[in-house]
Amino acid sequence: MRGPADITPLTCLDYPGKAACIFWFRGCNLRCPYCYNPEFVTTGGAEERLDWMRFLDERRGFLDAVVMSGGEATLHRDLLPVCRAVKQMGYLVKIDTNGSSPLVLEALIAEGLVDYVAVDHKMPAVRTFHLQNGVSLFDRFCETVGVLRTARVPFEVRTTCHPSLLDEQDIVNMIHEAAELGYTGTYFLQYYFDAGETLGHMKKPVRRYDRLWIDSRSALPLGYRNFPEDRYSFKANPIAVSA
């Protein structure tokens, strides 16, 4: 059973209300330019943490949960057995996913191996990526939301926002798409932050979003992560958005 490529030993941000660690898995079927984990996106390299079970055993009673991330964790061939082992040790399991593997999530849910899911909505439907098999990522995203709603597994939908990639209208469209799929929770908008080298060599945003405009048109309650403190200001030349 192959384990994660690396481990973040403690996070209090990635699983709501829980002390968790993050298991990082290699491989992804997307190449998002803002990805700050380029070393995990490609499948090159066979390195893995062989001590992951010992790591968890030593932290019983201190950590509550394990976040499965990457890369794209649902592509990892041993994700199910890893989750089985983690659950047997008494930990909660959260899956971070781009929504491209609804059947994997179904299998995890069927065995009671997942407690929380964060689904990334990458682009509005008209601009969506296509996977290697030609299937639209948006179609898979829709399937994933349907699987989670049917199973009643706690989950969130979120979008990473960079003004060079998504403008205010794009964001509002994506929020409405999630609402039309029956999602009723908080829609989280995560502002791109400069965390070093990214897969697409993204630069720091030159402007800030008009959050008041987004708020006034949102179909869902919004949660903002990493956004600048001066909530409704933006720096220079905002992208024109339609009313």
Image: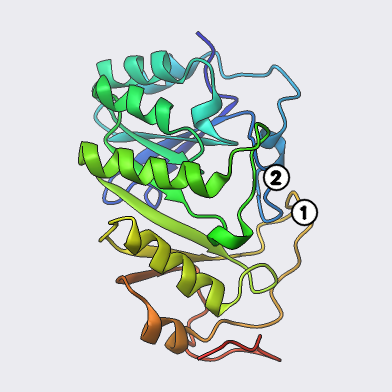
Instruction: Please name which of the two marks, 1 or 2, marks the residue nearer to the observer.
Output: 2
Give coordinates of residue 121: x percent, y percent. Answer: 49, 54
Give coordinates of residue 58: x percent, y percent. Answer: 35, 21
User: Dot 2 corresponds to which residue?
Assistant: 31
Local crowd size for mark 2, using a 10 Å CA cut-off: few (<14), some (14–19), many (≥20): some
Residue that lies at the very extreme toward the top in this rendered image: 1
Secondary structure under the numbered disc 1 in the rendered image: loop
> Residue shown at 76%/67% (left/top)?
203
Identify residue type, mark 2. Arg
Res 14 visible: yes
Q: Is disc 1 in contact with disc 2, using a CB cutoff of under 8 Å?
A: yes
> Residue shown at 33%/74% (left/top)?
219
Q: Picture quarter containing residue 242?
A: bottom right
Q: Which mark is residue 42?
A: none
Residue 81, placed above or below residue 65: above
Residue 1, placed above or below residue 76: above
Give coordinates of residue 174: x percent, y percent. Answer: 47, 65
Q: State how far apart marks 1 and 2 are (Cα).
A: 8 Å
In this rendered view, identify the residue nearer to me: 45 or 100: 100
